[in-house]
Image (cartoon, grey):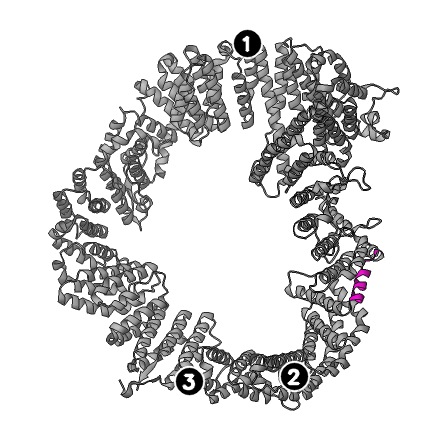
Amino acid sequence: MAQGGSVVPADSAEIQKVVFALIDAETEKEKEERVRDQLLISLYGIGTKHPQSVLPALLAYRRQQTCTKLQKVMIATTLDSILNHDNVLTAVDEKTAIEIIAAAVDGLNDKDLVMLGSDLLVTVSRQFCIEVMKQMLNLFQPGNLPSVTTFQTFGRIFSANVNDSIPFLSAVLSMLAPLLPEARTDQLKRAIAGAVAQFADAILEYVARENEAPDQSVKVHFFQNDFGVIYEYILLHWLPKMREPELAAFMVHATSCIARVISKEKLQETADRLLGSAVSVVRKHPHESSASEGLAIVLEMLSSNAKSILEPQLDALLDVIFAQACAPADYAKPFAVKSHNEVLRCFAILYLNFPDRIINFLLAKLSPNVVKSTVIKDASDRSVVGALTIVNKLVNQPDVSFSFYLNALLKSLEPIIAPTPPVTLSNNVKQILAQLVLTLADRLYLTVDNSAPLIEFIVRQCSIPATTIPRSPSGLEVVTDEALRAACENVLHLLTTTVHGMETILLPGLFDYLVMWQYTESARTVAKCLVHLNTQRDVFATLAPSGAVKRSPAVVELFTRLFVLSGSAIDQSDGDSLLRLLQLVVGRMAEALKELWEGTITELENFFTMRASNEGGETAWDGQAWEESLLKLLQTSLHDLKNVEPELIHRIAECFTIQIPLYIDFPEDKAFLYRALGTTLEISTDSLVVNKGLDGIFNSVNHSKIVERQACAVAVGKASSAHFDLILSKLDGFTVPDKQGKRSSIFNLFGSAKESKQESVDSERSKSTIVTCYGYAVSGAPRALLLTRIDDIMRSIMPFFVGVKEFAIKHSLCRFTEMLAKALRETNSTLDKRQALMFHMKDFVKSEPPELRSSVRALAVTACAELAQLPPKITMEEVEDALLLFCNSVFPLLPPRHDSSEGADAANAAYLNYEVLWDATIKALSEFMVTVVKVYRNAEATVVLLRNLKPWLESDSDHERYHSLTMLHNVLTSDAVTENVIAPILGMAMGLLAMRSMDPDARCRETALACGKRLASILSNGKSSDQEWIEAGRQSWMKESLSSHAAATSIAGLFYGILEGDQLVKFVRQLYYQGLLERRAVTAAGVAAILQATLKNKWQPLKEQGPDILGGLLFALKTVRDPATKVGIEGCIKAIAEHDTEMVARVLLNQPVPLLPSTAALWRSLGSVASFAPILLQHCLDTLRTTPCYSEVHIHARCASLPILQSLAVLVELFQSSNNTDLLQANFADLAPVLIVITAAMVGAQSSKPPQFAVSSEQTGADSEWKSVYKVVPSRFAVDALKQLLKNANSVVPISFEMIEDPVMYAEGLHVTCKCIFQSAELDAKKVIAGLVPYLNSEIDAQRAAAVAMYSAMLESKKPTDAGQVQEVVNHLATKNSDQALIVRVFCIRGMGSLAQFGPKIVNANADSILRVILAGLEDSADGNMNSAPIEAMKALNKLLPVIDRARIQEDLISISVRLRPSFESESPMIRSMAFSLFGQAATVAENESVRAAFTQEVHDVLVILLLHLNDDNHEVSTATKSVFKLLLPLLKSEALVTALSYPDGIAYSRLLKLISSALGTDFADKIPAYLNHIIGYFRSESPTMRANAVLLAGNLLAQVAAAGQPDTTTSHMAPAVIHLLSDKEPLVRQRAAEALGLIYQKSSHHV
């Protein structure tokens, strides 16, 4: 250490050299942003550590003539960054600062440097403001204005350092004022105005912080004259000439800011001009926020200092800013919103000074004439919305009362709230008016006297129908009806819940809105408010009595109104509020009902909970249950009132009747009212009330609405139980001809006279209503009374059947017929008109189109089913005629199909309607069939049914088969079906059901099994077990059930188990004559499986039919094309073979290869027979062992022997038999070695020639099949055989078979395959070793390689457990170490390496042989660059090092290390990785002190290589290198390195190098020069990654040298080389070089 040990900065000249180099690297040729960024980062890093050296260096480089503009930009950026770092600026000396300022000022004149120069001046001004201002003032030259950026810089300086810049303000202003006329461009004018505005802000801030100011005597008036001159010039000369919108707005804002610091006299003098200019710009450019903000500033100043000048211009001013206020604000643009808010602020300022003028102006915009005229011109939205928006802001101002103008405002709002005549206003106006109402209420301006129109307006908007289309005036964002309604609902709710005292204003008016038809849609919102208000006071106490001047609705009226509205409450949000209010009304109406309703309301509220949980779900909400619950509650309540307050029942009925007109536009609500009224009339005993109620229903029903027609009929049906004769008299009146021969209309009988044209339009629909009412009246009538009136009813109804074409009438007639038949069936009475009604019903079915369009078909069939049950029975011919008609009409109908595509809402809605019709039609036909069986209960009926169903059971359409099966099942489940009834159809039925049990449609399968279960139950009188049928039905939904043999066998047992004798023969014949030839392949295959099980288990009863059955199977095998069905048929033949082997034993072994599909399948089937498999297996094995592999061997070709190929083909089929697993496992040790050797020999071989007879001139069909032998690939045969062996012997099946056939991957594929063979659970190693010995000396290289590969895999799998067997294998391998084939030698090395698994004892016993083989492998280069032998040797050595005797290996460690070094730099990533790993393993076994010392030196010699490869291009190499480092740590004995390498794997390479370099600098500082000498050689590496890694490592190590204060000769030596890499062709290298320089000189220092 030098004397005193003081630390001084590194040599400035050296740092300057580095700085110059980094700047030199910044050229136009450098296109990579990451390199440029790194150059800046390095300069910044060095500069923050050595600012005294770097700043002068930067300035010195800038002074050079060769400094380019791009480099000047870099210098300026770096200067600004360094000066902004911590306290660097405070440490800069004045001389350097002045030079920096001069450079920055010089940059102001360059367009590319101007902004950087400006930023740099602003930065320096924070510490050297005086020097900066002196330089800046020099820019003011006579007759020459500074640049735009100069003025911007002035303004920024004054804003950044107010205290130091204010002393220069007077000079700046005085020098600027004379130069104003020289400004020619708009941009320059803008810059000057903006700067002066910042000057004004600065002096105002200076004075405002007077206590902190350096000179507290400075006041604003010191500068008023200078500011006044500039202000006046800008106002008079510049502002009027601005045309560009944004520029003009900016000038207005700047001028208004300057006006704040001029004298009051000057302001009053120029007020007119200033205001006029501001207004003009705002009018021309309304969307510029700076213009409106400037106007607001002007208005504030004039209001305080020149109010008298402002008043004369007020009218013109209001017109301008009102037009701006009316312009819609674009909320997507913040500046537009700000501009709008500033305009509103202008009105607020003016209102404080001229309230009368402002209010009168705004109210004039709301006058009736103005509103009407603006509506016509479609400008109402802007004008009215603008006025209301301004009023809303004024009303909402705090500390300012609006009470004085309230009445005038409310009067002006009348043409908008309730215009007379009505005027259509847009939703925009209504929405802002609703906001104003809320504001008035919140400010407590609303009272009982003035609020009614406003509240009614809000309620009216809450009643907007959701379907109304809003107006779309131009310029305004459209407020939809839904949005307006939601907004007004929120307003009403807020008024109720948040505004104090609103209950006195809202009550009792809210009750009036409930019973007004035009406000029906708002009922739930009003009810919600009333329920809330009732928590604060008794709302019913506010109701005016009946004798009052303004009568409120009675409680009964409220009850009936709320009850009807509650019918649809479940479909609305907040619908439960209607229910809660209804409960309150009931408690006030009748005390006797209070307890009932309190107990029931909780149950009804559960509906809302269930609906909320179901919302968005797949299941549609069914509101019918809700309505039925309400009607049941009403009925219970009326029954309770009957004995307590009977008059109340009559009043309720009257109120229901009176309120019918309230629901003219609400058919659903009207329908519910009809049902509620019908329920009430059923209990009412007052005939006058009942008569009026019925008249009300009939007079008001809208026949064009189906829901109203149906509800009308339901109401009539409910009332008919007590008033049947009265209802019949009214209905009969509709059908009595009048004097002109026309039928009386429902309109002119009870209602007002209608025009004949209207009557003719609705006559058909009114007839439908009449007929439907008849049906429900008959259904609800007392039965005894009905029988006395039946003839009169039929006399009135029958004329409606004549010439009917309208769907509605057909629908009603079918429903009437059904209801009538049901009612008469209860009395067991006959019907004289049954035949006529049956005829009409069938005629309706015939007239239906082929498509399903209505429910008439279903209703007609249902009606026929009801008529058929009336006595006496109809004939069987009529039944069959009806069945044929109905089946042909119903089954062809297409089933519903859901459309899941996007935009299919309409299609899905239609789908839902169609699905309902479809289900109803199918159900109707099914019920008709069940009815036929119940009525007749004989075999003839079932024969007729099956005869009509059979075509549909065999249909090609899934839905036709399924629904015919469903109907058959429904028939069979009828109590009328017995054993005698089904006897004639049992055989055929079972065959059909067995076929359908294998149907591709899971629904058909399940239904067929259900039918079979029912038949079994009938035959056993219900004593059979259903569990097997149930399980089969459950499994039928699984896809596997169609392909599962077990499932088919189980199903077959269910069918044939209940059949005997002739029935069984018919069952089998049905299966093989029709089932196997089924058009649906899946069904045919399933039938084959069922037939196979039947033949296997029921052969004795079928034995006499054996030849016929086998003939049918063979015919089917030739005919069928479906593979699965063929397999099933072959299974049937196999089942026969198990009983009669002679019939199938003549199958020939000598078949052409490749085997035909049918032949192969037969082999698999026969191979599963226990007596065949062993014989065939042994025959094939002997052929493979004794037959030569090649029939011919040429120079360029090897032809495989045909017997070999035939045996392999047969073995493939035999191995695939599922029953041969045990056999294959028993012979696995014999089969596997032979097949692996044969497979190796077949690779690359060609096919054999076919037999001589196959190539004769006259070929038969069989002979021509041998021609395919030419196309055979022998290796594929062998691989398939081996693959099937492993697969079916439960061994591991490798994925290496394709590799075996690939010449490149052949060796690896052979190894993997052999290894998988030895992973078999049971394998006789001794037998395998002996079986491979004959092939070790084979003349075929492939067979020797396969034998050695088997030995190697055997050792790797650790299969020989006997030491003697292991020694025998090692001896065999040692003899092949010098084999001429490289692949044989490689497998020898691999086998030796596998000995590591057997432990040290065996390894050390054979150490000499092992090391001899492995060391020879390290030097084996027979395959050139592939290095397969050295690679294998490294792998083997890596395994053996941990187990071999360390004393034995010590003397070879250094030799191994030296031999590994060339592999560190190999081009192969795998070799590099393995070499590094082996090097690390070698380090762990070094124990001898001298060896450890030598090996440690080896580590230091290769340490640089390891560090560089930590960031190798290959990830595996990088990972291996880091692992090696951890193994080397015990030798290096460095705790710092241990810490550095303990970071997680994701750490960046640069960070890791920094940590490792720091550790090396701590523990191995003396070796760093050697490391650096080694590194510099990599600067010329061909790999860009290595060059980049090397220079980065050098930078980190040099940084350690610099930080340690060592002599920097190394740094001086390395720096030029690093600098040279700044010009490398690769961007990564250049980036790392720049980073390295930054690392070096950020820590550079030396001791002196």
| Residue 988 x %, y % | 49, 15
Q: Is residue 486 above or below residue 643?
A: below
Vertical order, 309 against 955 (above or below): below
Left or right position of 1122 against 1362 = right
* Quadrant of res 169: bottom right
Expressed as whole percent of the image width and height from the top left, the position of residue 549 reads 82, 41
Task: Inspect the image, locate mark 3, and give the three-letter code of the amino acid beneath it.
Answer: Gln
The one of 778 and 626 positioned closer to us in this rendering: 626
Residue at the bottom extreme? 142
Instruction: Tell me if residue 365 is in the magenta stretch.
Output: yes
- Is residue 1150 at all visible to an observer of this figure? no
Q: Which mark is residue 52?
A: 3
Amino acid carrying mark 1 in the image = Asn
* In this view, the mark in front (3 or 1): 3
| Residue 938: assigned label | 1
In terms of secondary structure, where does tag 1 sit?
loop
Q: Residues within 10 Å of mark 1 (few under 14, many from 20)?
A: some
Rounded to the nearest angstrom, the CA distance separating label 3 from label 1 is 119 Å
Amino acid carrying mark 2 in the image: Val
In the foreground, 85 or 787: 787
Determine the secondary structure under disc 2.
helix
Q: Marks 2 and 3, Cα distance to the nearest angstrom?
A: 42 Å
Whether residue 553 appears in this view of the structure is yes
The range drawn in magenta is 355-368
Residue at the image position 45 percent from the left and 29 percent from the top:
1121
Point out which mark residue 220 bears.
2
Mainly helix, strand or loop, the magenta region? helix
Residue 238 or residue 664, whichever sits in front: 664
